[in-house]
Every structure is written in structure tokens, then in C-alpha cells.
Image (cartoon, rainbow, N blue to C red):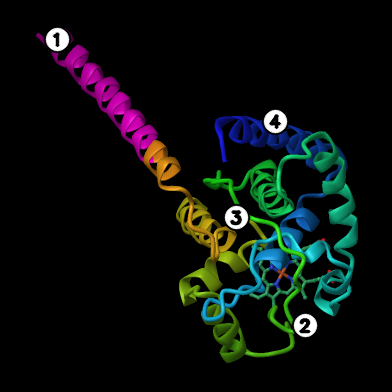
């Protein structure tokens, strides 16, 4: 994955922002991203955010009822950015959907690979079952109790601490079975360091100005 791919992702992000705002379709886009990712099985490393939800078999799974609409909407973006994988496109649509509805900004690392292999039906949680079922499903994905609570907020995005936990859990969900290339993680760490240094300089100069005025 080269720099050109990262640039294309940014262009697709802009298109998705415009599309999701215009069509008011954030909930269904988020549900698409979650249902593509939420089939992951950490033990067998099958399922997960790999674009397989677009296959005829998987889209027909009962849990995915109605999601063809979101797939078709994403197809409009895919047509303008054909190099982007479906796996990245659906997860990007998910993070943009959260952003557009004034939820937290979720760190997005591209590079997911596409698959046409759909997992067996029944990997997503069943709303009729209880907490032990939810635990079983989320633990299978390699996620935790904390992730169950935070990600359930996908139904109603609301507070700052919640947003922080939500963003971290959503990032883990979108990267199940996907190891971001180390140079990207390094670049992100550098950005965080640069922002922290700039903020420290601004705060220190502010205090310096105040103490000078007092003298
Ligand atoms: C924890 C287990 C979960 C259960 C049992 C569950 C169940 C459901 C059900 C039954 C619906 C209604 C579907 C329909 O309209 O036919 C729904 C909708 C939705 N779910 Fe979940 N869900 C879960 C987790 C999540 C997660 C983790 C997210 C996102 C991170 C999410 C995002 C959504 C969204 C955005 C909708 C609304 C879709 C729309 O209005 O088109 N859900 N969920």
C-alpha cells in the first residue's frame, strides 16, 4: 500500500461524508461496517472486516436484512475510487457515519484485504439472547466486556468519556485480524507527539505571558 492509496482514501472519505450527509444514511452505513467486521473469529482468523458481506450468500443472512441499500450506496463511492478495497470502504463508511452524526473521530488505518468467502450464518449477536450470548460472540471476536458496552452505544451516540472508549473499541472492531503496517503506526505516533508538543508550547507561552503581565 503506497502513498497514492492513502490519498485515495482521503478523497473517498470526503465523498462518503458528502453522501452520508446528503442521504441521511449514517445508521445503515454504521450497521454495514459492524456486520462486515462482527463475524470475526479470532481462533480461526476467519470472517471480519474483509468486504465479504457484499457476497450473495452473506448479504442474504437474516441479520443483514436491509443492508443491500448500504452496499449499493457504497458502490457509488467505489466507482469513483476503484482502487480502494471493499473491506476498507465499508469500515471507512462506518467511521465517517459516526463522525457525521457528531460522534467521536475514530482513527482509521487503511490496508484491509477483500475476501469473497462468507462465514457461516449465525456469527452476529442475536438480540433475543441474553448477556452470556453477547459475551460468547464478542469474546470470539477477541473483544471485551468493555467493548460490548461501548460499542452498543453505536445505537445512540451520546458524553466525552463514552466517546473515547467508543472510538478505541470501534478501532479494534474495524481492525480485527488486520495488522496495520508498522510505518503507519509510526507516522500516527509522530503526529500525536507533534500535536502534544505544539499544545505544550502554546500552554507554556500563555502562562509566561500571564506571569509577565503580573510583573
Ligand atoms: C451488542 C449486540 C448487538 C445487537 C444484539 C444488535 C441488534 C440490533 C438490531 C436488532 C437492530 C435492528 C435491525 C433492523 O432494523 O432490522 C440493530 C440496529 C442497529 N445496530 Fe445493532 N446490535 C448490536 C450491536 C451493534 C454494534 C456493535 C453497532 C455499531 C458499532 C450497532 C449498530 C447498529 C445501528 C447503527 C443500527 C441501526 C441501523 C438502521 O437504522 O438502519 N449495533 N441492532
Mark in the foreground, 2 or 3: 2
Give the residue at x 84% y 55%: 70
- For the record, the magenta segment spans 189-215
* Magenta stretch, overall SS: helix
CA gap, disc 2 and disc 3 = 32 Å
Give whichever of discs 2 and 3 has the lower sequence position: 2
The residue depicted at 89 percent of the width and 69 percent of the height is 56
Determine crowd level at label 1: few under 14, some 14-19, many 20+ residues with C-alpha closer than 10 A. Answer: few
Q: Secondary structure at mark 2?
A: loop
In depth, the one of 129 and 182 nearer the eye is 182
Residue 13 percent location from the top left of the image: 69, 37
Callout 1 secondary element: helix
Q: In this rendering, is residue 154 above or below 137?
A: above
Can you say which quadrant of the picture contains the C terminus? top left
**Residue picked out by circle 4:** 11
Say which of 114 and 30 sits in front.
114
Q: Residue at x 51, y 69 (%)?
A: 147
Question: Which is closer to the viewer, label 1 or label 4?
Answer: 4
Of tags 1 and 2, the one toward the viewer is 2
Q: Secondary structure at mark 4?
A: helix
Task: Count residues near mark 3 (Cα–Cα under 10 Å), then give few for <14, some for 14-19, many for 20+.
Answer: few
Q: Which residue is mark 3?
A: 158
Kindly indicate whether the residue at mark 2 contacts the one at mark 4 (C-beta within 8 angstroms).
no
10 Å crowding of disc 4: few (<14), some (14-19), many (20+): some
Earlier sequence position, callout 1 versus callout 2: 2
Q: Can you tell which mark lies on residue 121?
A: 2
Amino acid at each position: 500500500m503506497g502513498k497514492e492509496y492513502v490519498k485515495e482514501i482521503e478523497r473517498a472519505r470526503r465523498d462518503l461524508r458528502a453522501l452520508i450527509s446528503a442521504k441521511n444514511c449514517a445508521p445503515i452505513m454504521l450497521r454495514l461496517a459492524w456486520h462486515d467486521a462482527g463475524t470475526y473469529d479470532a481462533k480461526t482468523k476467519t470472517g471480519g472486516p474483509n468486504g465479504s458481506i457484499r457476497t450473495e450468500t452473506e448479504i442474504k443472512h437474516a441479520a443483514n436484512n436491509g443492508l443491500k441499500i448500504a452496499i449499493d450506496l457504497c458502490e457509488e463511492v467505489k466507482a469513483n475510487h476503484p482502487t480502494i478495497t471493499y473491506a476498507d470502504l465499508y469500515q471507512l463508511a462506518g467511521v465517517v457515519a459516526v463522525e457525521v452524526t457528531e460522534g467521536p473521530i475514530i482513527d482509521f488505518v487503511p490496508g484491509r484485504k477483500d475476501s469473497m468467502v462468507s462465514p457461516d450464518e449465525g456469527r452476529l449477536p442475536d438480540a433475543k439472547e441474553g448477556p452470556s450470548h453477547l459475551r460468547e460472540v464478542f469474546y470470539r471476536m477477541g473483544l471485551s466486556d468493555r467493548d460490548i458496552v461501548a460499542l452498543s452505544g453505536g445505537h445512540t451516540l451520546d458524553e466525552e468519556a463514552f466517546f473515547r472508549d467508543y472510538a478505541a473499541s470501534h478501532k479494534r472492531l474495524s481492525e480485527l485480524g488486520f495488522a496495520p503496517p508498522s510505518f503507519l503506526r509510526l507516522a500516527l505516533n509522530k503526529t500525536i507527539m507533534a500535536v502534544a508538543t505544539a499544545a505544550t508550547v502554546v500552554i507554556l507561552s500563555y502562562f509566561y505571558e500571564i506571569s509577565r503581565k503580573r510583573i
